[in-house]
């Protein structure tokens, strides 16, 4: 999971207006947690003359701050790390949990999870080597765990690993995790091939004076199918195939990852066949991609949610009436359609509507008059210039947004327009996402914002402890709203302490209802991810919430 990474395939988006235009196959695959839809449209091609056989040219929308998995947390970081590192387990493109460094996925059925749910045993592969030739052993997994819980290490995932009471390594290829109590998302969230789960090398980092600033973040060494050859900051990351990869030598020899912030520039590069994969393209570009010969247009469902975060440490967001009024003033359905052109689903809670834990009560419905009445009640009175004031102070604040997405820019403008219509003086501040979410000095991470168009990408489990619990205040985790409610804390812990969905479901209903009452976050939409892919590239199967490199050793071009 991550800020605006980490996670896994999901059931299909609901109605997709643009998908109705697609005339080719619609693949619907059922996964362990539901189904995942990929809508595909293919331009005519008999092979592209611009294809560089054996080389995949791919674009990401922002530069990583680091490629050290323990201190990273951004989408682009986990995305790239997925080619360099491994976890004990991984997700495929259909939400199936598969073994990675482990020989099998622990379960109650195979004895990998004890009957009381407190002990998880992993048996490691014997044929894995780090990219410098050293063997991977259980000591590396233990070192990874101890690094996550080290108070001197800036990690977003410390709270997850602190749920472990102890971790034993009875032999070089066995890892035994003793949980403090049963934790339902453990197999999904601990040591999974994703940001917050990659295993790091003990022999390289154990003597590091400071993991946070260690050169390893710029020169990573993993166990994965590709090694980092070069990194031209702001421009290009080059990965080379690892001939000693335990999964077999990759069929692609090189991956060029270009850092292309502007989606319009990405589209131009797709049209001129300078890219084989462009991800995170804009909704307005979807139909254009479908008309480019030799290119597949993919619309992939994700667990990436966009929502508003109100910084409750700052007035006026410490007043629940103001948060509710700002929420009521937004036509979220209309904003979603205008910004995402039918490629997204309006969100009602922090849990998607296709989840077994979803509560249909919903976020506040659009009601401008009620919004105005609440602001009046809170003492914010409309002045002669149309701006509301209270005790001589205007209702004025900034709306923080990312620069990398045209859809987000449209969304921010629509939110600004709606709030100004009820007397709120709001200014949009757009900055790169790595400035917003850097750890620990990012604007969101350090609480240096008023309101934020935020995002969160999770896994199929409904656990949201990293963004709702008091113990998860940023920069420790992702609770950027600095929301604290003892009931929510208790319900959240109770919900993850059992594997029984029947017992968990009512607890998540209570959590969703309380969050939609208090509104530290206002759910906006669940985003569909748009790709343009060279028709000569085979084996590319995007994982809608995790790194697309989960099966990169099988790609061919």
Image (tube, rainbow, N blue to C red):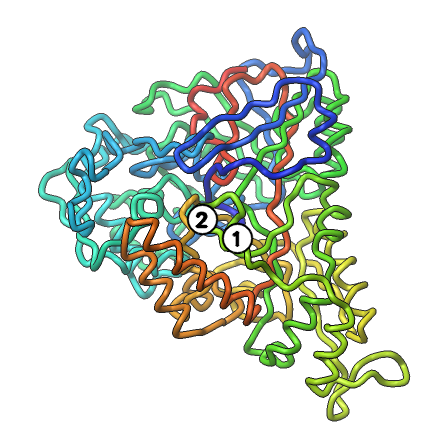
In this view, the residue farthest toward the top is 46
Residue 118 badge:
none
- Picture layout, residue 379 above or below residue 100: below
Quarter of the image holding residue 511? bottom left
> Which element is circle 2 on?
loop
- Residue extending furthest bottom? 391
Residue 351, position as x, y percentages in the image: 50, 52
Residue 153 in view in this figure: yes
Left or right of 92, for residue 446: right
Determine whether 154 is above or below 236 in the image: below
Q: Nearer the viewer, residue 484 or 45?
A: 484
User: To which residue does mark 1 refer?
Assistant: 456
Q: Which residue is mark 2?
A: 1
Q: Position of residue 15 (x, y in %)?
A: 66, 37
Quadrant of residue 321 within the rendered picture: bottom right
309 left or right of 541 in image: right
């Amino acid at each position: 999971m991550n800020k605006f990474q980490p996670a896994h395939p999901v059931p299909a988006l609901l109605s997709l207006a643009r998908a109705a235009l697609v005339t080719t196959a619609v693949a619907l695959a059922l996964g362990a947690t539901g189904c995942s839809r990929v809508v595909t449209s293919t331009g005519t091609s008999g092979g592209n003359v611009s294809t560089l056989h054996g080389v995949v040219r791919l674009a990401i929308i922002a530069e990583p701050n680091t490629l050290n998995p323990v201190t990273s947390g951004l989408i682009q970081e986990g995305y790239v790390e997925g080619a360099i590192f491994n976890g004990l387990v991984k997700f495929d493109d259909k939400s199936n949990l598969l073994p990675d460094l482990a020989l099998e996925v622990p379960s109650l059925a195979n004895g990998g999870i004890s009957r009381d749910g407190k002990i998880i045993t992993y048996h490691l592969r014997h044929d894995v080597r780090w990219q410098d030739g050293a063997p991977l052993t259980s000591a590396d997994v233990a070192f990874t765990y101890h690094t996550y819980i080290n108070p001197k290490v800036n990690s977003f995932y410390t709270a997850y690993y602190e749920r472990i009471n102890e971790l034993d390594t009875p032999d070089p290829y066995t890892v035994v995790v003793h949980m403090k109590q049963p934790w339902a998302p453990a197999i999904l969230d601990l040591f999974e091939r994703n940001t917050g789960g990659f295993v790091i090398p003990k022999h390289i980092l154990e003597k590091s004076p400071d993991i946070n600033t260690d050169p390893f973040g710029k020169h990573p060494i993993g166990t994965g199918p590709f090694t980092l050859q070069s990194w031209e900051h702001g421009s290009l990351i080059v990965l080379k195939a690892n001939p000693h990869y335990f999964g077999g030598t990759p069929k692609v020899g090189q991956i060029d990852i270009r850092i292309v912030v502007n989606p319009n520039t990405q589209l131009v590069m797709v049209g001129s066949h300078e890219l084989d994969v462009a991800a995170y393209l804009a909704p307005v570009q979807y139909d254009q991609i479908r008309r480019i010969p030799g290119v597949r247009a993919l619309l992939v469902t994700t667990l990436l949610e966009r929502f508003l975060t109100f910084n409750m440490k700052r007035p006026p967001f410490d007043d629940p009436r103001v948060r509710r009024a700002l929420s009521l003033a937004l036509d979220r359905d209309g904003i979603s359609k205008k910004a995402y052109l039918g490629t997204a689903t309006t969100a009602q809670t922090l849990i998607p509507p296709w989840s077994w834990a979803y509560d249909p009560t919903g976020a506040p419905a659009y009601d401008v008059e009620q919004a105005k009445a609440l602001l009046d009640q809170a003492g914010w009175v409309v002045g002669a210039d149309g701006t509301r004031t209270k005790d001589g102070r205007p209702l004025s604040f900034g709306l923080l947004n990312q620069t990398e997405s045209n859809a987000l820019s449209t969304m921010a403008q629509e939110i600004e327009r709606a709030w100004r219509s009820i007397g709120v003086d709001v200014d949009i501040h757009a900055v790169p996402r790595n400035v917003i979410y850097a750890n620990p000095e990012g604007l969101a991470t350090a609480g240096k914002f008023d309101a934020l168009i935020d995002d969160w990408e999770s896994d199929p489990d409904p656990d949201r402890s990293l963004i709702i619990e008091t113990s998860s205040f940023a920069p420790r985790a992702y609770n950027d709203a600095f929301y604290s409610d003892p009931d929510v804390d208790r319900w959240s812990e109770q919900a993850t302490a059992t594997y029984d969905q029947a017992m968990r479901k009512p607890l998540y209903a209570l959590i969703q209802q309380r969050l939609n009452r208090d509104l530290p976050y206002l759910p906006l939409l669940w985003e569909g991810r748009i790709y343009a892919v060279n028709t000569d590239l085979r084996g590319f199967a995007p994982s809608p919430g995790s790194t697309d490199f989960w099966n990169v050793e099988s790609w061919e071009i």
